[in-house]
Image: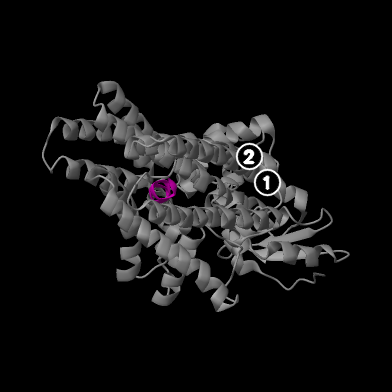
């Protein structure tokens, strides 16, 4: 390595560390500012140990109650313990394994149940992404520089910052996906019993983090089979044994999941609702651009403002995949392509064949997005690094400068996005609760507001989300759907 290349690597390491520090700050700034939305209130309901049926029976009975009475179902109490947290998940949402929720229960009991306190757990977990992605890059690319580039990109990625501030298990799933992938590659490189045991443990940890870890495990299996030539080699057999061990560790919850499939169907049937193909494609491209740039544009924004970042992100992603395929070793690009493909195809094909919107939900595609960001990190690491060449020095220098500008532009877009995100009281990620802050301000201006609602559809979670924004003077009258009566209210 030349002195210039060495200085350049050291300079970029310094830049990556600076962005890492900034990324840590971004994950903790204004944690309680954005609306505590529908899904997050269900996290708190689980932490408190209540099932949805218990909550509806005790609250949606037509009596007029105040906001504080509603909030008691959002915090732990002496009547409900850790067992009730697990029981609530098993009954209502068995598709959500208990690791995050049990940890959140213990966290809230220790640090309080404020919005900032509970979200701080996800933010803290998200910091483990950085050592995990660095380790994965060392195993995959054998390059510390690629690891530093990946750290820089993930530090300011608006997508990852947003999910780091959610009281949901997605930052944990991101960590365990990276961790199990790195552990697999190490076990393949150094096939000792200890390393395969570590892989089995990280795989079990991933299973207990999020159910779609099964897709990651399938991708790992396909990768091992491919690099072993679809033969039962020693490494292939070791992988099979480790995967079985990880699955056996997950078996208690898998049994609960299979026993309560009706609850899974009831909780997830909305993902099977048909969506027009054009709308799906628009969301796919929009989600890709949010890995780098996100100022909360909606469908009413000028078309050009939507197309420019989306087109640039799409071209950058396509070129990075082409570059990895052409320049990286086969074992490297094969791992990235399989990680991306299994996750993406498992969600996209059912939508295209059967109808649905599974592939439009960005959080379900975290392994796919991580694979894309690994490819982009490799692209930038190779393009921005100085390479000595007597014949084409000027050409190399100008190309290198161009890619440095592109990298700086990508980082700048992420930083600008996060400035907007930090100052907002809501964002697209809040879905059904997106307009709650504006509605709550209207309700709170009334002298004696009474909010009337039923348990229809998503109303249960939305009412809980509203409770975090309403003044204590607000009264609520909640009823089950067939029992709605005419009620005078001043909202």
Q: What label does residue 48 carry, if any?
A: none
Camera-nearest residue between 113 and 264: 113
Classify mark 1: residues with Cα within 10 Å, few (<14), some (14-19) or many (20+).
many
Mark 1 — residue?
31
Q: Are marks 1 and 2 in contact (CB under 8 Å)?
A: yes
User: Residue 276: in sight, yes or no?
Assistant: no
- Residue at x-position 73% and y-position 73%: 486
Residue extent of the magenta highlight: 377-385
Gap in Å between the C-alphas at discs 1 and 2?
7 Å
Q: Position of residue 110 (x, y in %)?
A: 66, 29
Q: Secondary structure at mark 2?
A: helix
Q: Which residue sits at x=40%, y=36%? A: 2
What SS does tag 1 mark? loop
Left or right: 163, with 442 as reference point: left
Who comes first in sequence, dot 1 or dot 2?
A: 1
Residue 52, x across and y down, in percent = 56, 51
Q: Mark 2 = which residue?
A: 120
Find out whether residue 384 is within the magenta segment: yes
Residue 166, magenta (yes or no): no
């Amino acid at each position: 390595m030349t002195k210039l290349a060495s200085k350049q690597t050291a300079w970029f390491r310094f830049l990556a560390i600076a962005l890492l520090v900034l990324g840590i700050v971004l994950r903790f700034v204004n944690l309680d500012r954005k609306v505590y939305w529908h899904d997050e209130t269900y996290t708190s309901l689980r932490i408190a140990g209540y099932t949805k049926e218990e909550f509806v029976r005790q609250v949606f009975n037509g009596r007029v109650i105040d906001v504080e009475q509603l909030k008691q179902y959002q915090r732990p109490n002496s009547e409900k313990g850790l067992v009730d947290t697990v029981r609530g998940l098993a009954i209502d949402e068995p598709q959500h394994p208990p690791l995050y929720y049990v940890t959140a229960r213990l966290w809230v009991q220790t640090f309080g149940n404020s919005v900032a306190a509970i979200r701080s757990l996800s933010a803290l977990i998200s910091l483990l992404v950085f050592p995990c992605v660095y380790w994965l890059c060392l195993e995959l690319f054998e390059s510390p520089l690629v690891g530093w580039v990946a750290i820089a990109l993930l530090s300011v990625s608006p997508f990852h910052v947003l999910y780091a501030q959610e009281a949901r298990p997605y930052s944990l799933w991101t960590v365990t996906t990276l961790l199990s992938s790195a552990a697999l590659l190490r076990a393949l490189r150094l096939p000792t019993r200890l390393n395969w045991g570590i892989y089995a443990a990280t795989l079990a940890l991933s299973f207990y983090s999020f159910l779609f870890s099964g897709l990651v495990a399938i991708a790992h299996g396909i990768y091992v089979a491919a690099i072993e030539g679809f033969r039962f080699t020693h490494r292939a057999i070791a992988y099979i044994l480790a995967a079985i061990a990880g699955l056996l560790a997950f078996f208690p919850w898998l049994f609960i999941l299979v026993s309560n499939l009706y609850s899974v169907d009831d909780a997830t049937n909305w993902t099977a609702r048909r969506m027009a193909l054009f709308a799906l494609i628009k969301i796919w491209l929009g989600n890709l651009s949010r890995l780098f740039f996100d100022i909360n544009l909606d469908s009413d924004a000028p078309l050009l403002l939507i197309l420019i970042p989306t087109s640039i992100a799409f071209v950058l992603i396509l070129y990075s995949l082409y570059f990895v395929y052409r320049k990286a070793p086969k074992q490297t690009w094969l791992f990235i392509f399989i990680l991306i493909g299994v996750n993406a195809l498992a969600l996209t094909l059912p939508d295209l064949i059967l109808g649905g919107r599974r592939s439009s939900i960005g959080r379900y595609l975290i392994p796919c997005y991580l694979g894309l960001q690994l490819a982009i990190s490799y692209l930038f690491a190779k393009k921005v690094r100085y390479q000595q060449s007597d014949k084409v020095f000027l050409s190399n220098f100008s190309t290198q400068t161009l890619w440095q500008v592109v990298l700086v532009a990508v980082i700048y877009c992420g930083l600008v996005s996060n400035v907007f995100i930090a100052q907002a009281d809501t964002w697209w990620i809040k879905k059904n609760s997106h307009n709650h802050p504006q509605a709550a301000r209207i309700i709170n201006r009334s002298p004696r507001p009474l909010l009337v609602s039923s348990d229809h559809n998503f109303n249960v979670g939305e009412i809980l989300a509203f409770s975090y924004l309403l003044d204590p003077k607000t009264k609520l009258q909640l009823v089950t759907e067939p029992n709605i009566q005419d009620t005078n209210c001043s909202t």
